[in-house]
Image (cartoon, rainbow, N blue to C red):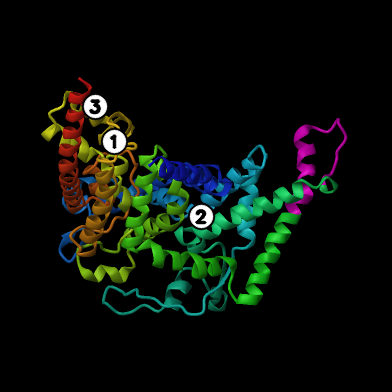
Amino acid sequence: MDTFADRLGRIGAWFGQNKYLGAIKNAFQNFMPATIAGAVGVLWTNVLVNDTVVQGNAQGLGGIFKPIMVLAPINTVFAAISFCTISCISVGVVMLVAQEIGEANGETGAFPAVLGFIAWGVVTPTAHAVTTLASSLTDSAGNAIAIGDVLTKGGVADLSKVGTFTGFGADYLGATGLFTALIVGIVALEIYNAFRKMDSLKIKMPEQVPPGVSRAFEVLIPTFLTLVVVGLIGWLVQITSGQYVNDLIKTAIQQPLLNIIGDNIVAVMFMYVLISLFWLVGIHGNNMLSAVKEPIFRPMLYANTALFTEGKTIALTPEIKAHGYYTMNVTMMSMFAEWGGAGVTLSLIIAIFIFSKREDNRAIATLSIVPGLFNINETVTFGIPLVLNPILGIPFILAPVVCIFVGWLLVTIHFCPYIVLEVPWTMPPILLGFLATGGSIMGAISQIIVIVVATLIYIPFLLVYENYQNKQASQAS
């Protein structure tokens, strides 16, 4: 056991000290308040102040409680919040990861974030051609309206000028551009760091020049050369592959990972085995694997959020798969495998309250219940303790694995709606399930099911562990 713990400890130390994994983890953690704000915006416009009715079913509270629709005029504010956070996440992430790499390389100030964004912009297409125009609009009589009529009435006189537009495309700004943002943010700042170390590239200014101006000239050449190199890499990729860097990364790296790992329940179950093993030797397993988990499963959440924001129904029917919803994502895993903390230990606390006859275990459970309701479990993890516990360590590994499988099954058979919104990780269970599924009671019921399942898993091991404790106590006396 000591040898195993030592090896896991070395792996954990490597993960914790790796500059790139740390930058990715910190970037997503720092952007989380913005994504939660965006999720609130989506809840407001799609659940609370929404009176849309689909196939006779109200899609929002407004369809049931009409007075709330008096707030509809400010929906545009919440829609803008959602767009600028969730729909533009790649911009925020590239700046944050670049800032992390810059600081790790000894840079100060906010310039690394600015450089990261510019480097991302250099390899991101901004000129787009519209090859076909179509309209599904109809007039009051039900007749189709030609797109040319819409444009001319909207002030576009020359339709030949409609074929191009300039700006960043939604695919590059949103979740589908996350891998590009991470890669460009890291590569660009490492290139910049290499140029910054060359004294011959620094423009030295007289001492009487203000420090801010002097530093601007000092980094001028490294900045320019960094952008040239990044731009040339993007250009070479385009002429050799016929694709922009963003598109190549999406098709060659991001999408295969999503297909192979993202919606693969076996891979996800194995990941939670690793997370629990790290915890059992005293290492924060979620932090260890977050740099791997976030880039794969967070885009899947935001893809679901985008579909939900567009009004794509999440009614519990097999047809919704055609809309492109993902079964797995970061919030889905929090909802089914991380409630109550790592090892879903809130279920252990419940089992202790029902079956435990030892005062020491009940005292720890009493101290742990309130933190556990907010998914904080260090009290029970180190108080029982679960660390290096060969008996309770088994359900600590088994329970989240079984729960994520049950959750996956419930979503797959459409008992539970697809998980579409980011919810704060401290959100209490059941309420978390309700909010994460866009305000669906079935999400709350699904989470109750896994709580019951996990509690049943912990009960026999708790009884065995207490028998062991009693024997140890009798031998000691």
Foreground mark, 3 or 1, reads 3
The answer to whether residue 214 is magenta is yes
What secondary structure is marked by label 2?
helix
What secondary structure is marked by label 3?
helix
The residue at the point 48 percent across, 53 percent down is 89
> To which residue does mark 3 refer?
364
Q: Nearer the viewer, residue 205 or 129?
A: 205
Q: Position of residue 451 (x, y in %)?
A: 19, 45
Mark 2 crowdedness (10 Å alpha carbons): few <14, some 14-19, many ≥20:
many
Residue range in magenta is 202-224
> To which residue does mark 2 refer?
90
The residue at the point 73 percent across, 60 percent down is 228
Alpha carbon distance from label 3 to label 1: 16 Å
> To which residue does mark 1 refer?
374
Foreground mark, 3 or 2, reads 3
In the rendered structure, which amino acid carries the disc numbered 2? Ser
Q: Position of residue 257 (x, y in %)?
A: 44, 64
The residue at the point 57 percent across, 57 percent down is 183
In the rendered structure, which amino acid carries the disc numbered 1? Phe
Alpha carbon distance from label 2 to label 1: 29 Å
Snapshot quadrant of residue 263: bottom left
Q: Position of residue 169 (x, y in %)?
A: 52, 64
The answer to whether residue 386 is magenta is no
Q: Nearer the viewer, residue 328 or 141?
A: 328
